[in-house]
Amino acid sequence: MESPGIIIAFWVLAAVTVGGCLMVLVARNLLHALVFLVLAFLGMAGLFVTLSADFIAVAQILIYAGSIAVLMVFAIMLTPLAARDNANSLYLLPALAAGLGIAGLVSVVAVITPWSELKGDALGQSDPVTTVSAIGDLLLGRYVLPFEVASILLFFALLGAIVLVHERRGPREGS
């Protein structure tokens, strides 16, 4: 990560991610908060790209920015309109204290870690290695059966959710 472009991209994406997270906190409309959450998820995916974690970046986009965001939109749309505000709650101060404590802990660990010893040469690697090909070979080779069982299980969970949400209607009159 010695290139100035990557360093600038890292800091810009970090600012976008933190800004999106802060906007989730201050947004009063729940749909606006969800849009800012998706922005934070995309910023995290960009951070993974700058750290040469390509598979995790794509998984972040597909799972969090895509699937979880769509699931949250469905949940918001199925709730009554009166429950869509992002009002303050009883847990605001404890959550703020916990968040500041975790941020302080991460900051202390980042400051006391000897980063100069963790360079690529010390780990035996000088260039980043892509992992997508190896993961794809394993998922479609050695672990194809668990992969397919998980996909079928998720499919039936989706069908079950549709059946539970589907509104039962009586027979139409005049039919």
Image (cartoon, rainbow, N blue to C red):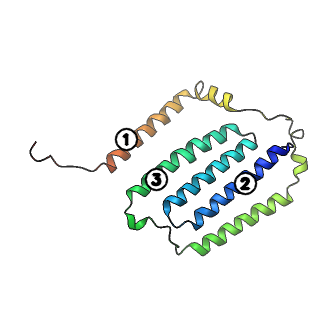
Task: Say which residue appears at 71% left-offset and 47% top-offset.
Answer: 47
Helix or strand or loop: what does disc 2 sit on?
helix
Side (left or right) of 21 relative to 89: right
User: Residue 159: which numbered mark, if any?
Assistant: 1
User: Residue 73: which numbered mark, if any?
Assistant: 3
* Residue 80 sits in quarter: bottom left
Of all residues shown, which one is farthest toward the left?
Answer: 174
Side (left or right) of 15 relative to 141: right
> Which residue occupies the foreground of this view, 136 or 89?
89
Helix or strand or loop: what does disc 3 sit on?
helix
Q: Distance between the residues labelled 1 and 2?
A: 38 Å
Residue type, numbered disc 3: Val
Question: How would you rate the neighbour count of disc 1 (Cα within 10 Å): few for under 14, some for 14-19, many for 20 or more?
Answer: few
Q: How far apart are marks 3 and 2 (CA)?
A: 25 Å
The C terminus sits in image quarter = top left
Q: Are marks 1 and 2 in contact (CB under 8 Å)?
A: no
Helix or strand or loop: what does disc 1 sit on?
helix
Q: Where is residue 119 in the image (x, y as percent from the top left)?
A: 87, 43
- The total of numbered circles placed on residues is 3
Task: Say which residue appears at 66% left-offset and 72% top-offset.
Answer: 97
* Residue 6 sits in quarter: top right
Residue type, numbered disc 1: Leu
Which residue matches tag 2? 14
